[in-house]
Amino acid sequence: MPIGTNVTGKMVTALKKLGFNKVFDTNTGADLTIMEEGNEFIERLSENKNLPMITSCSPGWVKYIEMNYTENLKHLSSCKSPHEMYGAILKTYYAEKNNINPNSICVVSVMPCVAKKYEANREELSNQGMKDVDIVITTRELARMIKQGNIEFVELEDSSFDEPMGEATGAGAIFGTTGGVMEAALRTVSEKLTGNSLEKIEFETVRGEEGIKRATVTIGEKEIKAVVAHGLANAQKIMEEIKSGKADYQFVEIMACPGGCVMGGGQPIKSSKTRMTVDVRKKRADALYTIDEKSVIRKSHENGVIKKLYDEFLEKPGSHKAHELLHTHYIAKEKYNI
Amino acid sequence: MAEENYINLTIDGTQVKTKEGMTILEAAKSVGIDIPTLCFLKDINEVGDCRMCIVEVEGRKGFATSCIQKVEEGMIIHTHSPAVLEARRVILDLILSNHHKDCLTCSRSGNCELQNLAIKFNVQNIEYTGKQSEHTIDDLSPSIVRDFNKCILCRRCIATCKNVQKIGAIDCMNRGFDSCISTVNNQSLRDVNCTNCGQCIEACPTGALREKDNTDEVWKALKDEKKYVIVQTAPAVRVALGEEFRYANRYKCNRKNGNGS
Ligand code: SF4
Ligand code: SF4
């Protein structure tokens, strides 16, 4: 099928055919991440503490900063990444509500990323001895399983993610491209800070292929400077600015892979020939922006599942319980010199 | 704005008008002529090392490396002359003679640039049989498996890790026959400064770099009746998964046309 085809419906059908008990959407986890990360940002901003805040969803990036900029770890958001947050919620809130023994739950994440395999094994990303996520497979591995399962993928009918945890927003969808986490966060942070609905929810300045994107966003009376970097060479440039005290911005999004998750190390491999003639990143990213555009709900804080989750279980973003389940800490690692 | 300069040349008998500064490879591509490559990876590895992309330029001695050689006014180029084809075949045979040809069990079978070249060149036997290097497979990293028995030393991974990611976890060690892509002191990727980003896998034309496959564990969980298995999928998966499937199967077993494969 052509590069950048949105196959959500067929993918869900295939996963059901493979025999998973439930098929859920990490985009919901992304909405939850925005609630926590947005809240953390607003707190840091009001206290003028540990700014700029840097996103922490990309495990390759997290390992990079832990090895190379140990003195700057305080800038990282303490939020776990979306699939880890979601795993933690599935093994607590969801298990309790549905009378399932959390020890019998096995959470499998399908990710565009191989660093997520490493992330899922990190000891801190567990709760009461249970890993938040048990197994991570990549897009390529899922394709192999579908072939092994004798499923004729292109012929499949569409189906939807399982309720009640399936609802996700357009903001969650764009997490998969560079600039997407920043845009999703800005939508929520703006409305939380001003109490007003945004007139235009697209933040075009943080979109696109530029390695480092800088934007100034006016929120109420405040001006927030945001920076988006992707690919670790660009991340390094930003870290050098922060280290030398030259950073005049408050919010930074970093993804380890050039282009973000759509170009992750677990995605279908494109030949040199294809990479010469097709802008693979753009095609896949455009498909995500289309999903966002067509979504009924496009802001994380308006997601019904998330609202209910806070009402029934987490109380509010940044609560004690939220910290216990959804936040983590970082560990300075030895740096190897070549 | 200054007007762009155009260059006229002939490629395989076709008159081509291209922008100045283009490589022969790009110029050929622009008129639908496909020159095989191996070490070339746009913007990342443009070094002309493997010489698979060589072409003949009339009036010049030796072959030109089309991925780095820029077009010049009046060039007459042959991309598939008998001499070019023979030279490419020698290069390919040399690579294949020191490659573990276990395509049947390789994760890249069907999507391997080396396998595709072998098909393109109708390789049915390999001329050279020489010493085979033996490398142990490094599968200690939770993310990446390195099998350098399949490596063709194209260095696309090194360029990606060093220039795109500025990490330099892998490099070319030793020389000559003993050359190999490795890490400091030949340690596992787990134990060096690798970030587990996997960009090197995306760059590799063969199965020498691949992800740690965890599908067996998933099948095991799915078969275990005591397990409640929940799957979740990241946003980027749904806009790329379809690329791994072809529409073609719909027309399979069309026996009437004798096309039963
Ligand atoms: S995974 Fe990333 S950091 Fe590690 S060797 Fe590959 S490109 Fe380099
Ligand atoms: S591991 Fe792959 S990308 Fe790296 S040199 Fe070998 S064949 Fe090329």
Image (tube, rainbow, N blue to C red):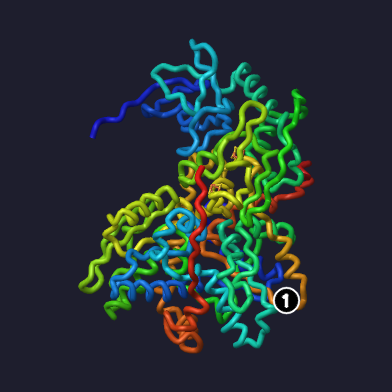
**Looking at the image, is A290 positioned above or below residue B46?**
below
Residue A100 placed where, x, y %? 67, 84
Label 1 element class? loop
Q: Residues within 10 Å of mark 1 (few under 14, many from 20)?
A: some
- Residue B84, horizontal then vertical, whole percent: 60, 19
Picture quarter containing residue B127?
A: top right
Residue A261 visible: yes
In the image, is A331 to the left or to the right of B152? left
**In this figure, which residue is indicated by the disc labeled 1?**
B227
Which percent across, then down, holds residue A21? Answer: 68, 76
- Position of residue A294 relative to residue A311, above or below, is above
Which residue is pictured at 49% across the width and 55% down the height? A67
Residue type of the residue flagged with mark 1: Lys
Q: Which of B204 and A268 is in front in this view?
A: B204
| Residue shown at the point (55%, 61%) measured from the top left | B238
**Residue under the image location 73 percent in, 61 percent down:** B216
Task: Name the chain under label 1.
Answer: B
Residue A311, position as x, y percentages in the image: 46, 88
Residue B164 vs residue B252, the one in the foreground: B164
Q: Toward the viewer: A327 or A283?
A: A327
Q: Would residue A202 appear left or right of B178 to someone viewing this image?
A: left
Residue found 34% across the figure and 76% down from its top: A43
User: Which residue reaches farthest left?
Assistant: A221
